[in-house]
Image (cartoon, rainbow, N blue to C red):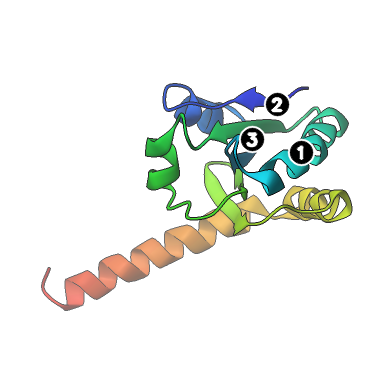
Amino acid sequence: MATVELTKDNFESTITDNATVLVDFWAQWCGPCRMFAPTFEAASTANPDIVFGKVDTEAQPELAEFFSVRSIPTLMVFRDNVVLYSQAGALPGNMLDDLIDQVRKVDMAEVHRQIAEAADHDHDAADAHGH
């Protein structure tokens, strides 16, 4: 599957409707972004079960701001609506392949349990302080 152009109109539905989504925040003027594009495109072809989305930070400044993207390229990985990875910098193909393998192996039931536990802890802490 080729990469998908993500905008503020389709970003949320893309993340919620797909199990795993890799998002490349980029801009046309960014040399490292242009160098990373073929690697990202090749990975999208090699992994048809994963959605590979691209956010043009010039055209979609709200998305870049929402995710606090300060430098590009920035790669984010969402799985079951959870950000598992977020890092600036272009990855070589072998490192991107390794990242995809690691993402596939994550026990999302455990991740969701940890998120729920942290939320309960935050809630309990707020209760203890009378909020």
Give coordinates of residue 19: x percent, y percent.
64, 35
Q: CA distance from mark 3 to mark 1?
A: 18 Å
Circle 3 residues within 10 Å: few <14, some 14–19, many ≥20? some
- Mark 2 near mark 3, Cβ–Cβ under 8 Å? no
- The answer to whether 88 is drawn above or below residue 40 in the figure is below
Examine the rendered structure and indicate whether residue 122 appears above or below residue 31.
Answer: below
Question: Label 2, label 3: how many angstroms apart (C-alpha)?
Answer: 16 Å
Q: Quadrant of the N terminus?
A: top right
Check disc 3 and give the amino acid type: Ala
Q: Secondary structure at mark 1?
A: helix
25 displayed left or right of 90: left
Which residue type does callout 2 highlight? Thr
Q: Quadrant of residue 35?
A: top right
Residue nearer the viewer, 43 or 105: 43
In the drawing, what numbered circle is on residue 40? Answer: 1
- In the drawing, what numbered circle is on residue 19? 3
Pointer 2: what residue?
A: 3
Instruction: Find residue 59 and report its horizontal and vertical position in percent.
Output: 46, 29
